[in-house]
Amino acid sequence: MSAGTPSGAPGRLRAAGRAGAERLAALRRLAVSTLDANWEHDHTVPSRTLYPHQWSWDSAFIAVGLAHVRPDRAWRELDTLFAAQWADGRVPHIVFNPALRAGAYFPGPEFWDAARADGAPAGATSGIVQPPVHAPAAWLVHRRAPSAASVAALRRLYPRLVAQQRYLTGRRDVGGGGLAAIVHPWESGLDNSPAWDAPMAAVPADEAVMRAYRRHDTAHADAAHRPTDLDYARYVALVESYRTGRYRDDALAGRHPFLVECPLVNAALGAAEHALARIATVIGADPGPHRGRAARTTQALIDRLWDPATGTFHPRDLRTDRLVPARTVLGLIPLILPDLPDRQVRALLAEARSPRFGLAARMDRPLPTYDRTAPDFEPLRYWRGPSWLNTGWLVWRGLLIHDRPDLAAGLRESMLALVAGAGCHEYFHPDTGAGLGSPAFSWTAALLLDALAEG
Ligand code: 9WN
C-alpha cells in the first residue's frame, strides 16, 4: 500500500493460492531482513537512526518475533536486557551502547547520570522502566521454540522476572492499592498519549529550556509527527526530578510531579504473573503465589482504573486521585488478562468495536491509538492517533485469549495490510495506512512475524 491507499484492503493478502502465499512469504522476508539489519552484537536496536540503543519493552516484542526465526537470538535479547537490571529489580527502559558517540540519542547516558544511583548496574542505563511485558514474551518464546535451551533460559530469567515484578508491585505501589505507578510518560511506552495531557499539564516546565538541548528525534523524523518541544521540556523536567532523588522511590508522593497508574503497565503486570505461573510449572517452581498475585492485580485494576460509565479502563492520576477521561487504546489492553471478568470483556469489546476504535471482523481502517471521534485526534502525531503494531498486537492477543477469532482475524488482516502496504514502519497513518516514523522498525517486523505464524 502506498501512502493514500486505504489500509483496510486486505483482500489482496487474503488472495488464495500461490500468489497469496508468495505475498505472505515476501512479508516474512522483509520482517526477517529488518530484524537482521537491526541486530547489534547482543541486542536489537529499535531503529538504527531514531533509537540506536536497546529499549526494554521493544526487546520483549522483538524476542517474540525472533522466536519464529532465530530463537537463540530471542534469548540473547532478553538476557542482555536483564543483565542491566538494577539491584532493586527495575529493568531500565534504555540500555546504552557504550560504543556510540555522545549525542547519538537524546537524552543520553550523561543526562540520566544513573551511575550515581544505588544499585545501578556497571553499564550506562536510564533510570526509569517500561511496561513489564517480558515474562509473557519469555513464555511465548519458549512456547514457540521449546527446547532444553529454552527451559534453561526460563530458569535463568525467572528470578530476574520475579524481581522485576517485586520492584513494580512494591516500591512503585505509590497509591497503596496494589497497582504500580509510573513516574514518567515514557514508562507507559505511549509517550505523548492524550492520556497524559491532564497529569502532564501539572508538571511545571518552559519549552524554552529545550534551547539548551539538541533533540535527536527531530533530526530523523518529521517534527510534526513527534512530541512537541513543550512535551520534551516536561519529559526533561520529570527526569531531573527523579534524578535529583537518585532514582529512589521512597516518598515519591511528596516530591514528584507526575504519578499515574496506567492500565497498560498494570495489565502487563497481571499478565506477567500469569506467565510466571506457567514458567514456574516448567522449571519446577511453585506457580501458586503467581496465580494469587495475578488475581489480585486484576481485581485492583478493576477497583482502581475501571469506569463503569465509559465501559473502559482509564489511568488514575494519583495527584488528583481522579481517572483521566481520555479514551485511548491503553484502556483496551486489559483484554490481555485471561481472568478479566465477562462484564469488562464485553464492555471493552463494545468500546473497541465502536466508531472510536473501529475493530471489526473486516476492518476498513487500522486500529488507532486514540479515540478517532475525539476533537484532538491527530492522525500524524505519534501516540495521539496513529496505528502501531504493538498496541494492535496486544489487543489481538487479548481477542484470542477471550475467544473472539472473528475479531482477531480482522485485526490481524489489518495489521498485515499495513506492513504489506508501507513496510516495517514505526507507525502508520490511521486512515491511509501511510508509513510514519522510522521506516525499518524492529517491533513492527517482530510482531508481524508472530501474526503471520498464527494465521
Ligand atoms: C523514549 C523505542 C521507544 C519505544 C517507545 C516509543 C519511543 C522513546 C523516544 O521509542 O520512545 O523512550 O525517544 O521517543 O514511544 O514506546 O519503546 O522504540
Image (spheres, rainbow, N blue to C red):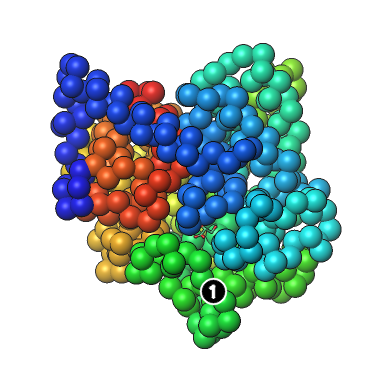
Q: Which residue is most to the top?
A: 148
Ligand 1 neighbours mark 1 (CB distance < 8 Å)? no
Image coords of residue 56 (percent x, y): 60, 47
Q: Is residue 106 left or right of residue 69?
A: right
SS at circle 1: loop
Give 297 or 157, whichever is nearer the viewer: 157
Q: Is residue 253 visible?
A: no
Q: Residue at x 66, y 18 (%)?
A: 149
Q: Is residue 126 visible?
A: yes
Q: Residue at x 71, y 49 (%)?
A: 90
Q: Is residue 71 left or right of residue 117?
A: left
Image coords of residue 180 (percent x, y): 64, 53
Q: Residue at x 41, y 65 (%)?
A: 226
Q: Is residue 418 left or right of residue 197?
A: left
Location of the N terminus by quadrant is top left
Give the amino acid type for the residue marked by disc 1 in the picture.
Answer: Arg
Number of residue marks: 1
Image coords of residue 436 (percent x, y): 33, 55
Location of the C terminus by quadrant is top left
Q: From this view, report whether residue 351 is shown above or below residue 383.
A: above
Q: From this view, report whether residue 419 is shown above or below residue 434.
A: above
Q: Residue at x 46, y 42 (%)?
A: 442
Residue under numbered circle 1: 214
Q: Quadrant of residue 453?
A: top left
Q: Which residue is most to the right?
A: 118
Image coords of residue 51 (percent x, y): 52, 54
Give 78 or 110, whichever is nearer the viewer: 110
Q: From this view, report whether residue 319 is shown above or below residue 23.
A: below
Q: Residues within 10 Å of mark 1 (few under 14, many from 20)?
A: few
Q: Is residue 256 left or right of residue 427?
A: right
